[in-house]
Image (cartoon, rainbow, N blue to C red):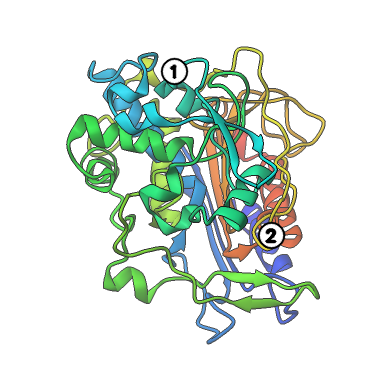
Amino acid sequence: MSELNDALNQTLEDVTGADEARVPGVVAMVTDRRETLFEGAVGVRSMADNQPMTSDTVFAMFSTTKAITGTTVLQCVEEGLLDLDAPAREYVPELGDIQVITGFGADGAPLLRAPKREITTRMLMLHTAGFGYEFFDETYSRLAVEHGQPSIITASLAALTTPLLFDPGEKWQYGSNIDWAGRVVEAIRGKRLGEVMTERVFIPLGMHDTSFTLNASMTDRLASIHQRQADDQLLPLDLVLPQTPEIDMGGHGLYSTVGDYLKFLRMWLNDGDAPGGRVLRKATVDAAVLNGLNGQVVTRLPGVIATLSNDAEFFPGQRKSWAYTFMVNDEEAPTGRPAGSLGWAGLANSYFWIDRRNGIAGYWATQILPFVDPVSFAGYLNFETTVYRHAVLGAHAM
């Protein structure tokens, strides 16, 4: 294990340092089914004050929130409270008012029509309902620039009430689907999503540092988000997600630590079981990790707003699909991750994977915009590759 620790620590050291074109700091951890195998924290939380990065640093998790929201959806299904194939408007009536945008008129006004079929919660979970993100889609970006469509990070209902980009079920497109899925959970439970997560996910898993709003302790340990400039230098931003959000945004709104999130990943390695009680049934987990796209595929995400995202794709040239609610790599990845594994990422360059075959998972956290930062993303891939290269699997697979 000392060889593995040394190698993984080196991957963290390689992306940090005095060079401002590197990353300010990184926290990364690896777990097997039983325990944390590695935890490392290198660099600083912010280049504004050089406070050291520590393993209990708090991060804006962005889209790694989605898998936790998906878990609360699956719990509703287990209890017979949610039909994934029923019209989602039966739970959230506003979804029945959403129209499809077909373009813009000569006066610049959006051209809208009724969708050909109903949105279902299954479509929301699979990102096939028709919603997108302004930083990955030109139409949504135009709605924001020309028509004042609020940014998704405003945590407002207005930010969610965007038109569909295509008829529900026609294809996969990454977007605000899971925020709507979170609202389905809220409607069923009669509580805010954060309350549901606390009661049904965080307490059973012992996740004490995860929330949509920051308490005093979390604020003291918060890492700053940095903006990569054109000259590769990094600028610390005063960017914190709304602390009195109108909506708990199930697609991106959580703050957490890497150690807390590792407990969530470990639950998926253990078929839904957790120290504080079962979070999901084994049968639910077995079904949830499978490709649900029925022939559709996960595609490259074009970086439409340069300050927020570069073009994004894991393992170009390889087939990827989607489960509830993770990306599935359908072929063995260059890192060594086997086919059928799960993973995803957060906008500020956080990344995770779950290898249920070998019983191992990991999370890499930095706080940098735009997404797919060349230094952080390459560091993450090197980190994952190092885990597999050092034969940790042989000792810990079950």
Q: Position of residue 151 (x, y in %)?
A: 50, 56
Q: Circle 2 is placed at which residue position? A: 376
Q: Say if 36 sits above or below 356 in the image.
A: below
| x, y percent for residue 364 | 58, 54
275 left or right, relative to 320: left
Q: Amino acid at mark 2?
A: Ser
Tag of residue 118: 1
Question: What residue lies at 34% left-to-right and 68% top-to-bottom?
Answer: 218
Is label 2 or label 1 in front?
A: 1
In whole angstroms, how far apart are the C-alphas of marks 2 and 1? 40 Å
Residue 339, above or below 304: above
Could you tell me residue 101's position as x and y percent? 59, 33
Give, as a three-letter code, the residue at label 1.
Glu
Q: Secondary structure at mark 2?
A: helix
Where disc 1 sits, the SS reads loop
Q: Furthest-front residue in view?
A: 107
Which residue is situated farthest in the bottom direction here?
Answer: 49
Q: Which residue is outermost to the left?
A: 190
Q: Residue at 23% across / 20% down in the picture?
A: 81
